[in-house]
Image (spheres, helix red, strand yellow):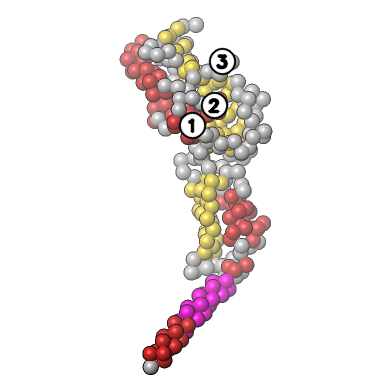
């Protein structure tokens, strides 16, 4: 009797597992044959300006999968489509999936430019929020901080460059000009007042930074990208208690690179 019950139990489990596999197979076949009813493209720009559009993504879709609406979803290689979209320079992340209604969703996260760089050969490219190079878009221009001057780095020569952010966070030493530019532009862009006031970063022959403000006929000498909080606190105080009283065009040079002092001069 016990042997019979044991065999019966095994048979029941075999039937249950077989049924489950048949059900999964049926669902997969049904999903494969389900007709694509619509394509939904959503692009998350964050706080950045537009560098890639729904039309760009739709064009990639048509080249990769043709016109999917009206066709079985199973004919759409979502993995290949994601890979193709991810290969675009302005895309940070992408997810392609479908729902039970037959709708195909393409969710795209655009990379966010942080700094527009014009090097000494007049090549233009971006440094993004992740610390990576980003090519300029001939059709769109991101309204971000600009850096120019004695800059040798090039997108063409090093398109896969990425800032080592661990070194920046753990040390006051930066092993490249681009790392210093990244740290400085991150500080400026994430401060409400500085983002509104500072228009340009100029790199001089000593590889020190000069800031060009939007308001006031002066240049701010920063020096290196160290002690940023202390330097900008001095600048805030000088703006508030100095220039607000004597006038914003009183001086041409505001030097904040020396410790515990602000040195001003009139050319």
Residue 252, above or below 109 = above
Which image quarter: residue 196? top left
Q: Which residue is mark 1?
A: 167
Nearest to viewer (mark 3 / mark 2): 2
> Where is 49 relative to 215, above or below?
below
Along the line of sight, which residue is nearer the eye, 4 or 241? 4
Q: Find residue 207 and report its horizontal and vertical position in percent.
A: 56, 18
Q: Which residue is mark 3?
A: 206
Marked residue nearer the N-terminal end (1 or 3): 1
Relative image position of residue 83 (x, y in whole percent): 60, 53
What separation in Å lies between label 3 and label 2 (alpha carbons)? 15 Å
Q: Is residue 247 above or below residue 113?
A: above
In the structure shown, which secondary structural element does the residue marked by tag 2 occupy? loop
Q: Is residue 77 magenta?
A: no
Res. 244 image quadrant: top left
Q: Can residue 262 be seen here?
A: yes
Separation of marks 2 and 1 at Cα, in angstroms: 8 Å
| Residue displayed at 42% across by 21% down | 227
Numbered disc in front, either 1 or 3: 1
Residue 198 visible, this orientation: no
Q: Nearer the viewer, residue 14 or 207?
A: 14
Residue toward you, 210 or 37: 210
Question: Where is residue 105 shown, x and y percent of the image?
Answer: 52, 59
Q: Which residues are magenta?
A: 15-34
On residue 138, which mark appears?
none
């Amino acid at each position: 009797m016990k042997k019979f019950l044991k065999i019966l139990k095994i048979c029941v489990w075999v039937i249950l597992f077989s049924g489950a596999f048949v059900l999964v197979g049926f669902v997969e076949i049904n999903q494969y044959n389900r007709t694509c009813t619509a394509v939904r493209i959503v692009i998350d720009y964050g706080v950045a300006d537009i560098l890639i559009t729904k039309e760009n993504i739709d064009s990639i879709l048509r080249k990769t999968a043709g016109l999917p609406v009206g066709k079985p979803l199973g004919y759409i290689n979502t993995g290949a489509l994601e890979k193709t979209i991810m290969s675009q320079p302005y895309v940070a992340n992408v997810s392609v999936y479908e729902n039970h209604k037959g709708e195909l969703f393409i969710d795209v996260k655009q990379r966010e430019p942080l700094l527009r760089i014009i090097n000494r050969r007049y090549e233009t490219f971006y440094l993004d929020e992740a610390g990576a190079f980003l090519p300029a878009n001939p059709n769109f221009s991101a309204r971000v901080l600009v850096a120019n001057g004695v800059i040798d780095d090039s997108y063409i020569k090093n398109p896969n460059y990425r800032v080592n952010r661990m070194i920046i966070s753990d040390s006051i030493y930066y092993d490249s000009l681009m790392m210093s530019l990244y740290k400085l532009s991150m500080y400026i862009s994430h401060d409400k007042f500085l983002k509104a006031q500072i228009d340009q970063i100029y790199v001089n022959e000593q590889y020190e930074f000069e800031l060009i403000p939007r308001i006031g006929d002066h240049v701010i000498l920063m020096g290196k990208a160290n002690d940023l909080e202390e330097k900008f606190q001095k600048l805030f105080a000088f703006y508030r208690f100095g220039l607000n009283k004597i006038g914003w065009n009183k001086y041409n040079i505001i030097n904040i690179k020396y410790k515990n002092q602000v040195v001003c001069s009139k050319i």
